[in-house]
Image (cartoon, rainbow, N blue to C red):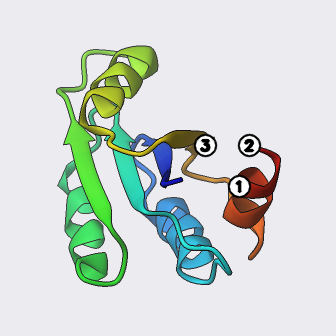
């Protein structure tokens, strides 16, 4: 079974980066990590470039036209390829067994 993580974000690359650190230390790594960006400024995308090759990141973004989190999550679903998806937010730093526990109970 493949596992993907969809992380919603908006204009907080510092917290998103801390969350990505958590996904780098998983005992069972995610097969894909989709960043669902609800219209952040370029700083978020620029920070994600540091993780190319380290994490299997896909980036989905739309213009900032107010709070449209559900729409960007739907766009993230369109690019997801995993059998099982975990939804989380930019400021939820996972402990090292986060993905493994989801796999265990899926």
Residue indicated by mark 1: 103
Q: How many marks?
A: 3
Label drawn at residue 56: none
Q: Is residue 16 left or right of residue 46?
A: right
Label drawn at residue 106: 2
* Helix, strand or loop status at disc 3: strand
Q: Which is more foreground, mark 2 or mark 3?
A: 2
* Helix, strand or loop status at disc 2: loop
Of pointers 1 and 3, the one earlier in the residue sequence: 3
Please tell me how crowded label 3 is: few (under 14), some (14-19), or many (20+) other residues with Cα within 10 Å. Answer: some
Residue at image point 33% right, 68% down: 56
Please tell me how crowded label 2 is: few (under 14), some (14-19), or many (20+) other residues with Cα within 10 Å. Answer: few
Of pointers 2 and 3, the one earlier in the residue sequence: 3
Q: Is residue 42 left or right of residue 80?
A: left
* Helix, strand or loop status at disc 1: helix
Q: Quadrant of the C terminus?
A: top right
Give the x, y percent position of residue 33: 41, 56
Task: Calculate the distance from the C-alpha at mark 2 to the C-alpha at mark 3.
Answer: 16 Å
Residue 54 placement: quadrant: bottom left
In the rendered view, would you say 91 is above or below 83?
below
Do the numbered discs 2 and 1 sit on residues whose CB atoms are within 8 Å? Answer: yes
Residue indicated by mark 3: 88
Residue at image point 36% right, 48% down: 35
Residue 88 placement: quadrant: top right
Please tell me how crowded label 1 is: few (under 14), some (14-19), or many (20+) other residues with Cα within 10 Å. Answer: some
Work out whether residue 50 or residue 98 is closer to the camera in this orientation and state it: 98
Give the x, y percent position of residue 102: 74, 52
In the rendered view, would you say 45 is above or below 74?
below
């Amino acid at each position: 079974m493949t596992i993907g993580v969809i992380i919603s974000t908006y204009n907080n690359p510092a917290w998103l980066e801390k969350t990505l650190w958590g996904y780098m230390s998983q005992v069972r790594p995610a097969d894909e990590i989709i960043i669902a960006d609800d219209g952040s400024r370029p700083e978020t995308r620029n920070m994600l470039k540091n993780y190319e090759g380290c994490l299997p990141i896909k980036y989905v973004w739309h213009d900032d036209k107010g709070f449209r989190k559900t729409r960007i999550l739907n766009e993230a679903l369109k690019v997801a390829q995993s059998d099982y998806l975990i939804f989380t937010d930019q400021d939820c730093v996972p402990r090292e067994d986060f993905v493994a526990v989801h796999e265990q109970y899926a």
